[in-house]
Image (tube, coloured by chain):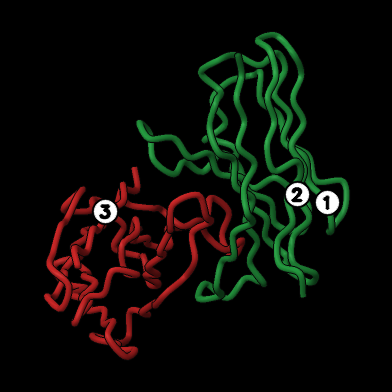
Chain colours: A green, B red
Amino acid sequence: DAGVIQSPRHEVTEMGQEVTLRCKPISGHDYLFWYRQTMMRGLELLIYFNNNVPIDDSGMPEDRFSAKMPNASFSTLKIQPSEPRDSAVYFCASRLGWDRADTQYFGPGTRLTVL
Amino acid sequence: GENVEQHPSTLSVQEGDSAVIKCTYSDSASNYFPWYKQELGKRPQLIIDIRSNVGEKKDQRIAVTLNKTAKHFSLHITETQPEDSAVYFCAALGRGMIYNQGGKLIFGQGTELSVKP
C-alpha cells in the first residue's frame, strides 16, 4: 500500500487566492483526519470524517476553511480566500476502523505558503 | 475540554544517556495512548503505543508507562543515539462527539529531543 497520499506537496500562493489540498487515505480506512501544524500552535485537528461523513469540525478556524469527502478514497481541504496566517504544513491522516486502538497513519503533508 | 499536556518542550541529552518525556491527560475515558516521532521535514510516525489495560510496554530501547489513576503516561528512551533526535508527540484518544463513532487523538505540544554525540 502506498500509504496516505497528499497533493500538492508544496503550494505557494498569494493572499486572496483559493487553495485546494487533496488527500487519498489508505484503502479500506474508514476515518480521515485533517491537521494543521505550525511552530506556534503545534499539531491542530481541523476536522475528521467517518465513512465520508464529517464527525467533528470544531477545529476548523473559520468560514474560509471547508472540507469535503465525496467518496471513500478522496478528500479536499479548501481555503478561500487564503491569508498569510494560513501558512503551515497541512497533514492528512487515516485510520482503519472504529476500534479505538487502530493505528493512525499520516500523509507526507502539504507545505502551504501564502504571500 | 479534552487536553494533553506534555513536558518538557525541549530536551538535550548526551549520546548514551536516557531521555524521559511526560504527559498528562484530562479525559478519564481515554483508553489508548500513542507516541509519534517527527523528524525534521517529515510526517509524524507511530513509534509505540499503550492501551489502558496495560501499565508498561517496551520495544527495544523505547518504553512507555501509564498511570491511569494519576492520568500520566511517559516515554522512556534508553541508550540514546543521534538518530533519536526529533520532535516527539504524545497523544490520548478522546471521546468521539457521537457515541460509537470512534474518537480523535488529542496531541500534546511536542518535545524537541536533541541527542549530542
Tell me the residue at 60%/13% (across/down).
A115
Q: Chain of mark 2?
A: A
In the image as oriented, which residue stretches furthest toward the right? Answer: A71
Depth check, front residue: A51 or B111: B111
Q: Nearer the viewer, residue B65 or A55?
A: B65
Between marks 2 and 3, how big is the CA–CA gap? 27 Å
Circle 3 sits on which residue?
A: B111
Circle 2 SS class: strand
Residue identified by numbered label 2: A23
A15 left or right of B90? right
Q: Label 3: few (<14), some or many (≥20) within 10 Å?
A: many
At mark 1, the secondary structure is strand
Task: Tell me if label 2 and label 1 are in contact, CB under 8 Å.
Answer: yes
User: Which labelled disc corresponds to residue B116?
Assistant: none
Name the kind of residue labelled 2 in the image: Cys
Residue B95 at x, y = what percent?
A: 45, 58
Say if A90 sits above or below A25 in the image.
above
Callouts 2 and 3 in the same chain: no
| Secondary structure state at the residue bearing disc 3 | strand
The residues bearing labels 1 and 3 have C-alpha atoms spaced at a distance of 32 Å
On the image, numbered disc 1 is attached to which residue?
A74
Amino acid type at circle 3 is: Thr
